[in-house]
Amino acid sequence: MKKQVIVHTVVTSQPNRLICGGSFSIKRIFNWLGVFFITSVTGNGLFLHQVIAKDWPEIPRISDQVQEFKTENGMKFLVLNQPGQNNVSIGWVAKVGSANEYPGATGLTHMLEHLLYHGTSKIGVKSAAKDYLIQDQLDILNQKITFNAEQPSVQNSTLVSTSTADEKAFLLPEQLNKFSQLLREQKQNLIINEYQNIYRANGATQLNTFSSRDMLASFMVIPEVRLELWFWMESERLLEPSFRRFYTEKTAVLEERRARIDSHPRAAHGEIFDSLFWRTHSYAWPIYGTAGDIRSMTRQHVKSHFNAFVVPKNLTAVVVGDVDAVAVEKLADKYFGRLSATEKQQRSAGKPSSFTGQVNYRANTENQSLVELRFLTQGLDSRDTAVLELIKRLLDNPNRLSERLIAQQEWVSQLSVEFRPLKHAGYFSIAAVPHSGIAESLVEDVLYDEIERMRQEGVSEVELEAAKNQFFADHFRELRSPFNLMLKMLYFEGLSTWTYIDHLPQHMLDITSERILDVMERYLLRDNMAVMHISPRTQKLPESQLTVDENIRNFSASQQQTVLKMMNNISGFPRYQRHQQVQILEKELVKASRKRKPVIRYVLNRLRVHLSELRLEEN
Amino acid sequence: MQRLLSLVVAMTITACSTSPTPVQVVKETSAAKKSAASIVKHPRELRFRETTFNLPRATEYFYTLNDGYSIYLIEDRKLPLVEVSYFARSDIQKGDYFITRHPWLQQYQQKIHQTGAGQLTSRQLHERLNYLSSNLQIKINDEYSRVYLDTLSAHFKESIDMMLNLIFNPGFSQTPLSMNDQTIQTTPSKSALNELGNLSKFTWQSWVYPHQQRQRLQVQPLTTEEKNSATLSAISQTLFNQPGIFVITGDIRTEEVLAFLNHRISLLKRNVEPSYTARSVLLGNLIEEKHNTGLSPQFHKIHRKDFNQARVTLGNSTVAQSQEDYLALKIIQMLLAPSGANELINHLESFTDSTPTVGVSLDNYYDTANDFQIFLQAPPSLLRGYLQACYRLLETLRKQEVSEKDFNLAKHNLESLYRQRFEHLHHLVEGMAQGDLLKNNAEFYREQLQALQRLDEDDIQRVASKYLNPDALKVLVVGDLDIIEAPIDNTPSIEAITGRSAPPFSIHNDAPLAINADLSTVQ
């Protein structure tokens, strides 16, 4: 049997030649069928160490297919011709993000993301002159309102209905009336959503913009025949953005922040943990900006930020589709050549300082428990990036963390391993959601133990191959979609250079188990780690005890004692955690011995009755 | 003092009016100077070649295997990847079991690979798939089951072998599906407690399947063995009862794949034990109530004080994708929410300075009624106003003919979505296979594009009147009801809707809406 498996190994190691290469023949088909049959017969005895595919398929080099050029003012264009596509995936990235902001003026890049949709003097407005006038009036009035709001006699207004008391303190009724009137006048002069509607009318889809710590990017998919529209529209909005509807967008951004961060206990603590992890580095600022900074932000702040950073030498466009690079270059010169080449001094973030010892953050919320171990790493440019990417996949392997914490011990319900290389630095994170009653410190220790175990025992060849398989499969899957390919190039360019799309797979090929251990020794250490524990807050609901019924008499004395003990334990849990006990008992029931099963089943049934009664009480 | 300040402001404003904010000064490059003159003033002046988009004919890729199985095959050697889909008609909505109306069971089915396949145990199967980096998924909906494999071509042979074993020879009896217990036991009350701040899952479940919560509680006393038995029956119903359709695209050779599949299917079919196709009495007893797709108005409220935000979902059950009115509903979805619900947000924004989170969705079941839903998330104090504004917008759609401009815009957008959807080769062929499977018409999407051209503005009004009548909409509100239902005197710009389109909370609702309540009784 083993011999047959070896035959299979040989065939598997030369897959392309078998499936794709050469001409079709009956003999080959029978060979192939034989291989499948053997696989099926050997089924149960087929273990990982028996089949190792070491010959990787040829990795397509994107760099060989991309044509790169710059316009005279320094804007970079990357063109990847993919014949046969109806659509072109296209976008631009500006190397500016929250890392280029500073305390007191955070959230500027994210605000740009919102404002860039509101058109130019030619798009989105009936009379540009009138709009500029209103914008200036709004700015002046806003300044006055802000000044007056600092006076102690200011009363709350009801007009901005989403405001908290704090926000309302900035507003005065009479000035607000004027302010609202101006906003209405401005709105009447606008052609709402004209920017998006022009694209939509021309068949563009996937229209989106994002901002992050290091970049601001905008992208879409547009029919190939309408490519020139993208050049007109994007060059126009980078040339002459209106920043109109600033005050409406400010409210929208505050709402967004409130909904996604402030209303979400885990996200709110995540933001604090981020600031602890990055400490004085500018990655510590929230991408949304702090609520205070958003409120005090002015249109002038945003304009200055735009003029300093969204300039040609900071911009790269990526075009993927059935396009001719020469034609694209002509369009680029014609449209983006209009942008000013003027350079302004830019604030740049350096590398964060290294940790001097473990950092701990503890919080209580209404949420589930959470444990996160986060290690400081280097930016995308580092030679260690590919290795850390592979370590992430190794730890994520079902035989490592999840085997110990989910399959064996059943201590956690969710596990995630993440590696995020950024521009100036990066982080490696392992997070787990412990089951109720499992101490966060215990889970932290086990997570770190598993890292330690990998460091001590090393990584087997099979594990390494599996992790590489996963990396290459994911890499090819990304290349399959022109849209994803464009996004990936934008992303790498935003962080460093787009050629990482080829560098990473190349680096990956050379990684050995020794190299993995070396990188682990340098990054995955307690002294280079920040730890967050989120524990559920005990609810102050009136609690009641679980009770027994007459069926308990059917049990022996010792079983009755066990039942009472279990029920006492469960009664000690707050109400919301008792629901979780149902799951735990169900799992126990599956594994329990024949003698213990009736006891667990009884407690489970009583618990369900108890929970139904609690629900009735709540109603 | 105040007058003085006003005067200063007025003077400043006057000064600004004569010199509005200057346009950013541009230092033109030589290239720009050459071309600037040829740039049109507005994009509407740009001229383009005609956009052509034709779906290829399904017959070009179609083959028949032994035993009545069909296959769509396309060779594409650009990347060393292969995608495989297997479709089998489930017809759950027409049968006795109503499996997907009970998501706990659906989740079971979709984790069928946790039971192992062929001779491989669950663990071996997982390890092997993980090593090969092959994705193997099962999705079961009301109409069809889809088993999907995405693998490196180097691992295609072994991976498809595991996939076939999973379809024809799953290892149900080996593992008691214990991994799934937690999923099944996650009741909405628990998920609500655990997922504070994330209402979507909670409300969605409550809304789409009004009976679901009760069914979940009924299910809990079942033992794992009983659940397995139910699951077995359900899976056998959906996967094994009739020949399905394969779709394979990527780095393959057509002749080799055809020969292999013919051989392999004939071997594996014999491995299907009769017990797998036996109907389970348990399941029949368990799921006795059919899904209510009636149009009667239902207003549900869930009082929760622990969220800063509040959420409302309103919607209706409409028609299947294969029916005439579906495309008009799709256009209505485009009109309301072309991209990120812009139109709706804009409409709602006109009432306040705030921007709610908004979404409009329409399912795409082929011959099952699809749900049309609008959801809004906003601070509780604004929710009611937004909801009323939303009602007004729907009323406008029903009573006024949509403008030709808006109509064409939505139509173009819909066409683009089709184009986008079928850009990926595998999705294109999957579309054909689904059409083939569900309606015996592989040309369905080609016909849809033609039908779209025949649609006019009257259709929109007619369909809106039929399905988006406020009296027929079901509404679920989650949030702090003390604030949501407070008087709205402070927001005079919102008009109250009277008559038959009354605001939802004017309807008295005695029945408490709770996790274990039978929602179907709430009228």
Image (cartoon, coloured by chain):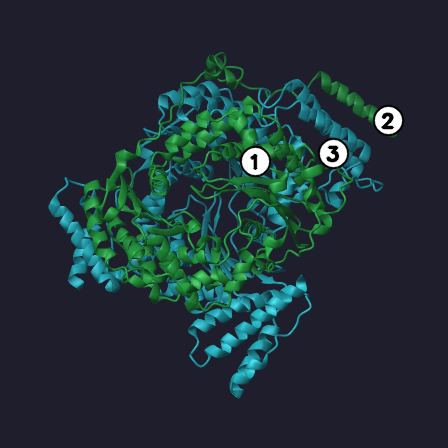
Chain colours: A cyan, B green
- In this view, the mark in front (1 or 2): 1
- State the image quarter where residue A80 is shown: top left
Residue at which label 3 appears: B493
Q: Chain of mark 2?
A: B
Residue at which label 1 appears: B466
**Where is residue A484 shown, x and y percent of the image?**
41, 38
Q: For residue A317, which numbered disc appears in the image? A: none
- Nearest the viewer among A388 and A549 is A549
- Kind of element beneath mark 2: helix
**Where is residue A223 shown, x and y percent of the image?**
42, 26
Q: Chain of mark 1?
A: B
- Nearest the viewer among A537 and A112 is A537
Q: Amino acid at mark 3?
A: Ser
- State the image quarter where residue A393 is shown: bottom left
Report whether B434 appears left or right of A336.
Answer: left
- Kind of element beneath mark 3: loop
**Where is residue B120 shown, x and y percent of the image?**
29, 62
Q: Amino acid at mark 2?
A: Leu
Q: Earlier in the sequence, mark 2 or mark 3?
A: 2
**Where is residue A463 shown, x and y percent of the image?**
32, 58
Alpha carbon distance from label 1 to label 2: 60 Å
Q: Are marks 2 and 3 in contact (CB under 8 Å)?
A: no
Alpha carbon distance from label 3 to label 1: 29 Å
- Nearest the viewer among A547 and B436 is B436
